[in-house]
Image (cartoon, grey):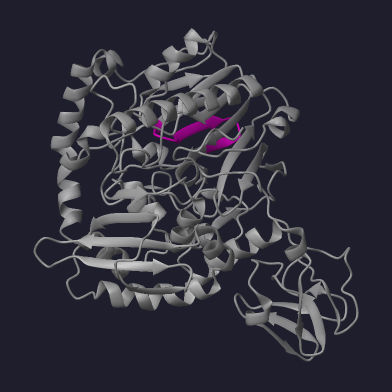
């Protein structure tokens, strides 16, 4: 097995049974804020793009780069697809031209042309954009685990499959905290230092639990080339910066007694059969990492080459024709009506200010108590976000249903809050579609045993309230015709005489004639990863949960 770094979380894996390309990302992401570091745009993408298999772990734009996938990755590749609760990732890849898919059940080892693979999908509303995943590969000789951004609660399942030779795991920050918060510099520095220490320690615990032969710190850090974000780069000797380099983390691991880490730059190759698994770099890493001066010089050169991409994108963001308040009111109001658990979790208002010195600000109150959107009226709120009007106009024009995966990760905003981090706010802003919101609401409901057993009466039948497919509220989306229940959210059907799902295997329904007891032992949909948290949304300044 040979592994070549392709940048950030991307690798090209060569085996006797075929090649795998994972998470290829080249174009700037999140409103032109993030770039892969070091630059990977000059790699031999004709070679890497001709892989036999493609694995895209999740929909975050530093893992899923649609323009690059469309233009540079062969559509002959077979996609190794995580088992997610919605079809968004598969739909997006099909729209790009991919047509061959292997869809293993989560945690199930399958053999594909001699190559053993397992994908573990984490599917709580706080896992990535409704999903994050790890890829395990066995070629008959070596085992690789690419965990990238995923945060499994434990690694016992991977260990039970045999000793792992190569472990790829995230170590660097991938969040907006604490940089965007309107806090005194001293407080922000203390929070950043704590965040950096936690992410180092968390990755060390994973490394020690798995006990792999060799570790490859990946999935970060990005770099920031736009002038307003330049200060986020780790080039100022600031130990509170949450975006440290691989070299920094590898050196830190050595102080903890670990020398199994290897530096995987874009183009770096390692052969797992080679004694000691040395790195074969395409250039001397010291040309970048020797000092803050050499890294700064590299970034300035990269900025000169690639900043025009950002400037071109910026010109497309303003949409003067968009009435921001009216559009958000029309979009969010029906979602707020359905957001029972999320609204209870927020229990207050969120103030959203879209600033524009020339055209004027738009100040909006999203009220999770009255479930309404209106012009901000001076009400006291615990949570506030400020950003540029053009960014909201772009989100509205594109009808971007995941603001976490766009605006928030761009770091092109500022935030204030009174009290602790509230994950429900970010769940709402990543679930700005009826499908996503219903899944999140159903997932939260099923964490409560009483709600999991809740039934509703539809005509002459009592049925479980939440659809076994994607947890839509059947009191709203269920209809019955000739003994068959249809969930109008996605058109799935069940035979009410026995609860059998007529659309797919393994999604049977709890049901009984009205007035009789619904069988308690019947199938109830269960969400994997109830204890998981997504890298980008979860932490902020919360204590480590593992």
Q: Is residue 382 above or below residue 22?
A: below
Instruction: Say how many tags the image has.
Output: 0
Stretch in magenta = 6-19
Residue 232: quadrant of the picture: top left
- Asked whether the viewer can see residue 37, the reply is no
At 19% from the left and 48% from the top, the residue drawn is 309
User: Is residue 311 within the magenta segment?
Assistant: no
Q: Position of residue 393 (x, y in %)?
A: 25, 66
Q: Position of residue 59 (x, y in %)?
A: 46, 52
Q: Nearer the viewer, residue 335 or 97?
A: 335
User: Quarter holding the N terminus?
Assistant: top right
At 36% from the left and 76% from the top, the residue drawn is 329
Q: Is residue 325 above or below residue 381?
A: below
Q: Is residue 509 left or right of residue 282?
A: right
Q: Nearer the viewer, residue 250 or 344?
A: 344
- Asked whether the viewer can see residue 510, the reply is yes
Q: Nearer the viewer, residue 7 or 196?
A: 196
At 32% from the left and 75% from the top, the residue drawn is 327
User: Quarter holding the C terminus?
Assistant: top right
Q: Position of residue 45 (x, y in %)?
A: 35, 39
Q: Is residue 509 left or right of residue 191?
A: right
Q: Position of residue 81 (x, y in %)?
A: 58, 51
């Amino acid at each position: 097995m040979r592994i070549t770094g392709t940048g950030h979380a991307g690798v090209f894996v060569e085996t006797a049974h075929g090649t795998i390309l994972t998470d290829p990302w080249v174009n700037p992401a999140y409103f032109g804020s993030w770039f892969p570091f070091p630059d990977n745009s000059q790699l031999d993408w004709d070679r890497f793009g001709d892989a036999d298999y493609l694995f895209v772990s999740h929909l975050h734009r530093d893992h899923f780069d649609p323009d690059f996938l469309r233009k540079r990755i062969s559509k002959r590749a077979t996609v190794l697809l995580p088992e997610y609760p919605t079809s968004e990732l598969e739909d997006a890849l099909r729209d790009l031209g991919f047509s061959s898919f292997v869809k293993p059940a989560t945690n199930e080892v399958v053999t594909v042309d001699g190559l053993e693979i397992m994908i573990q999908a984490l599917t709580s509303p706080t896992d990535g954009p409704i999903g994050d995943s790890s890829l395990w590969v066995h070629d008959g000789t070596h085992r690789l685990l690419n965990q990238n951004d995923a945060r499994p609660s434990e690694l016992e399942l991977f260990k039970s499959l045999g000793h792992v030779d190569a472990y790829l795991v995230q170590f660097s920050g991938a969040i907006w905290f604490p940089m965007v918060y309107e806090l005194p510099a001293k407080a922000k520095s203390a929070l950043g230092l704590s965040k950096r220490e936690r992410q180092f320690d968390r990755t060390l615990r994973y490394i020690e639990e798995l006990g792999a032969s060799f570790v490859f710190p990946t999935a970060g850090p990005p770099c920031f080339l736009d002038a307003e974000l330049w200060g986020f780069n780790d080039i100022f000797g600031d130990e509170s910066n949450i975006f440290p380099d691989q070299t920094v983390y590898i050196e830190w691991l050595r102080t903890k007694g670990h020398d199994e880490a290897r530096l995987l730059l874009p183009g770096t190759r390692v052969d797992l059969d080679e004694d000691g698994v040395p790195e074969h770099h395409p250039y001397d890493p010291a040309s970048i990492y020797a000092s803050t001066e050499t890294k700064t010089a590299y970034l300035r050169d990269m900025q000169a080459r690639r900043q025009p991409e950002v400037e071109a994108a910026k010109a497309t963001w303003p949409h003067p024709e968009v009435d921001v308040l009216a559009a958000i009111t029309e979009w969010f109001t029906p979602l707020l009506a359905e957001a029972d658990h999320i609204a209870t979790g927020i229990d207050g208002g969120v103030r959203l200010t879209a600033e524009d010195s020339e055209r004027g600000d738009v100040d909006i109150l999203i009220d999770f108590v009255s479930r309404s959107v209106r012009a901000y009226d001076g009400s006291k709120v615990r949570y506030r976000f400020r950003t540029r009007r053009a960014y909201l106009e772009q989100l509205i024009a594109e009808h971007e249903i995941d603001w976490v995966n766009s605006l928030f990760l761009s770091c092109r905003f500022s935030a204030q809050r009174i009290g602790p981090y509230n994950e429900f706010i970010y769940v709402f802003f990543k679930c700005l579609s009826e499908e996503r919101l219903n899944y999140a609401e159903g997932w939260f409901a099923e964490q409560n045993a009483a709600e999991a057993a809740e039934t509703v009466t539809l005509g002459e039948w009592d049925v479980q309230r939440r659809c076994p497919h994607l947890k839509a509220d059947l009191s709203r989306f269920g209809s019955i015709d000739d003994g068959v229940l249809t969930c109008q959210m996605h058109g799935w059907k069940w035979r009410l005489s026995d609860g059998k799902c007529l659309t797919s295997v393994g999604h049977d329904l709890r049901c009984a004639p009205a007035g009789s007891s619904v069988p308690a032992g019947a199938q109830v949909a269960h969400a994997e990863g109830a204890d998981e948290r997504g890298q980008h949304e979860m932490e902020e300044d919360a204590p480590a949960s593992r």
